[in-house]
Image: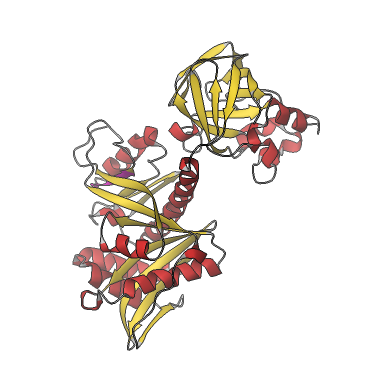
Amino acid sequence: MGDGRLLQVNVSAGVVPKLPVDEARVTHAGVEGDRQREVTVHGGPHRAVSILGIEAIRRVAAEGHPIAPGTTGENLTVSGFDVSTLPVGTRLAIGDEVVVELSGPANPCRTIRQSFRELRYGRLSGAAHPADSRMYARVVSEGMVRAGDRILVRQPTDDSAERFTINDRLDRAERESSIAFWEAGREAGLDVNVMDDGEIAAAASSSLPGMAFNIALGFAHLPNLVERALDHFATHAAAGWVIADDPPWPGADSDLTFARWAARPEAVAPASLPDGTVVRELRRSEVGPWASVVVEASGMSPEIGRAWVLLEEHLARVAHHHRFVVEVDGRPVAAGSVHTHHGVGWLRAGSVLPEFRGIGLQRALIAARVEHALRTGCDLVGASTVEDGASARNVARLGFERVGTRRSYPTTGVEI
């Protein structure tokens, strides 16, 4: 990997083009003096700095596009190496103080369309043109940067970047799966208020207490936006939980720790079934067995159980959501679902009736859903379990690897 130079430092109040400055301070929150207009799809500690190479700018300009340093919103215009082709986890030591770590490509949005002929801003798409994409970076060491600073390029030294990428994919799948569940509740006429804004999402319900309908996701990556979750819960008079890595506000205490698991579906071990037992996917029109088992196995209150029964009909229509049951001699005794999203199968709601636990039904249910994810083209499957619980032991036995931790932070009594 070759080294390079910092050609230009660019900031703005939230518009493009970003304009050059002689120097700026780079912090874990971003470049001081810079703002983003769409804060739920840009910014945050894992997207603190955006970077684009002058080599990519010149290639795009040569096609007749009116692009120049800063016009597509990058904070740092660099030269001497193709930053777009570097692997996630690569570190750039800039000047005497700053070190950033590449966290992923920055998907283009219509805000930058004026930099392209016929407004074709997809020219910077990492999927279509991986050599010319802007890149996001998180800040490892804060400090000042100046135009002309030398940049030292350092290869990734461990698998932390890969784990970050895996967790990012799992987060997206979990969020889409949860939104589908909440929206099914709304369509069933339940008091479920959904916030879906870019990479953060939340549900709030004062009449349906508990985490299923009162939870906020996406704040592990965007803790700077946690006030949006707190405001959502306050607006709907709901006691909720924010899911994050670290305390998302001063003094926040977690009440539950979740282990996050991932596996390549082809590597998950098969699971045997006792005689007389079958696992099958329910048809879209087949409503009732799944919710009944989940409600009974989980010991839900009557009001929450009724909500699950009512929403199942609407959840069954969701194209990417698949419900499974395990039957013993024709009786449904275990149930779970899998939601597929952009190549990820996210396992949800695995439940076994108490009298049928301990004979391997949950492992069989997991294996069946993983097999389904593989058949539908998923290259990754994931799950969230209570730390050190029975579900955690089962996914580990089947070959899942623990890739992270999330914690729930109750919002009761928190003032914004």
Q: Where is residue 77 in the image (x, y as percent from the top left)?
A: 63, 23
Q: Where is residue 7 in the image (x, y as percent from the top left)?
A: 65, 18
Q: In this rendering, is residue 393 above or below 92? A: below
Q: Position of residue 317 (x, y in %)?
A: 46, 69
Quadrant housing the C terminus? top left
Q: Residue at x 33, y 67 (%)?
A: 350
Q: Give 25 or 98, whichever is nearer the viewer.
A: 98
Where residue 261 sits, quadrant-wise, is bottom left
Q: Give 319 or 105, whichever is nearer the viewer.
A: 105
Quadrant housing the N terminus? top right
Left or right? Give the position of 20 relative to 351.
Answer: right
Residue extent of the magenta highlight: 238-243
Left or right? Give the position of 371 relative to 278.
Answer: right
Q: Which residue is drawn at 47% across and 18% down?
A: 32
| Total numbered labels | 0
User: Which residue in the rendered view is the most extreme toward the top?
Assistant: 22
Residue 366 appears in the rendering:
yes
Q: Residue at x 46, y 78 (%)?
A: 283
Residue 72 appears in the rendering:
no
Left or right? Give the position of 18 relative to 414.
Answer: right
Q: Residue at x 54, y 56 (%)?
A: 342
Q: Position of residue 19 (x, y in %)?
A: 61, 17
Is residue 305 highlighted in magenta? no
Where residue 64 sits, quadrant-wise, is top right
Q: In this rendering, is residue 404 above or below 186? A: above
Is residue 240 highlighted in magenta? yes
Q: In this rendering, is residue 334 above or below 99? A: below
